[in-house]
Amino acid sequence: HSLTSAEKALSTAMHLLTITYPLSGENKLFIPIIKHLHTAYFYSLKSFTAKTSFNQFVKKHKISKEILTTREQLQFLLNSYTTSTLTFSRKNSYILCDADYNLQTINPHLLHTYLRTTREFIHFLKGVLC
């Protein structure tokens, strides 16, 4: 069930990034895309953590560093968005600015990378768990 929910969240993120965003050109869609990718990771992790701890799973199956960092980066971007004092669009980017004027830039290339990594992780989990 959790893996099905992860696939649904991934599918929604993919649709937003590959269909809706190119049609609308609206950079504000980047935040819902990140939320859906984060949700996909959440449900993916939930699918196996009932049986084993996350650290044990990572060691046993040699999960790539890229997959682990993508999960962390998605969480970081969501936290940055919720705590940002200013957000704005600039060309093909959505910029998050905190109170200290630290900037986080979200762009389609970055989101495509996160999408690919999330899809690979879910595909890997399906192979291991099913």
Image (cartoon, rainbow, N blue to C red):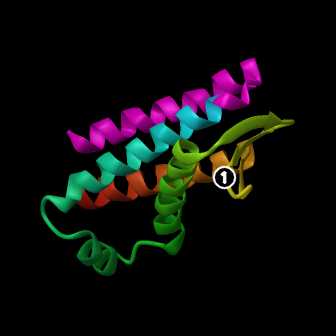
Residue 29, position in %: x, y?
A: 63, 29
Q: Nearer the viewer, residue 45 or 64?
A: 45
Residue 20 vs 37, above or below: the answer is above
Magenta span: predominant SS is helix
Mark 1 = which residue?
Answer: 99
- Residue 21 found in image quarter: top right
**Amino acid identity at mark 1:** Ala
Q: Residue at x 28, y 76 (%)?
A: 55
* Residue 5 counted in the magenta span: yes
Image quarter (top left, top right, bottom left or bottom right) of the N terminus = top left
* Residue 3 counted in the magenta span: yes
Q: Residue at x 63, y 36 (%)?
A: 30
Left or right: 37 as drawn, with respect to 21 = left
Residue 79 vs 19, above or below: the answer is below
Q: Nearer the viewer, residue 32 or 79?
A: 79
Q: Which residues are magenta?
A: 1-28
* Label 1 SS: loop
Residue 93 vs 21, above or below: the answer is below
Residue 70, position in %: x, y?
A: 53, 60
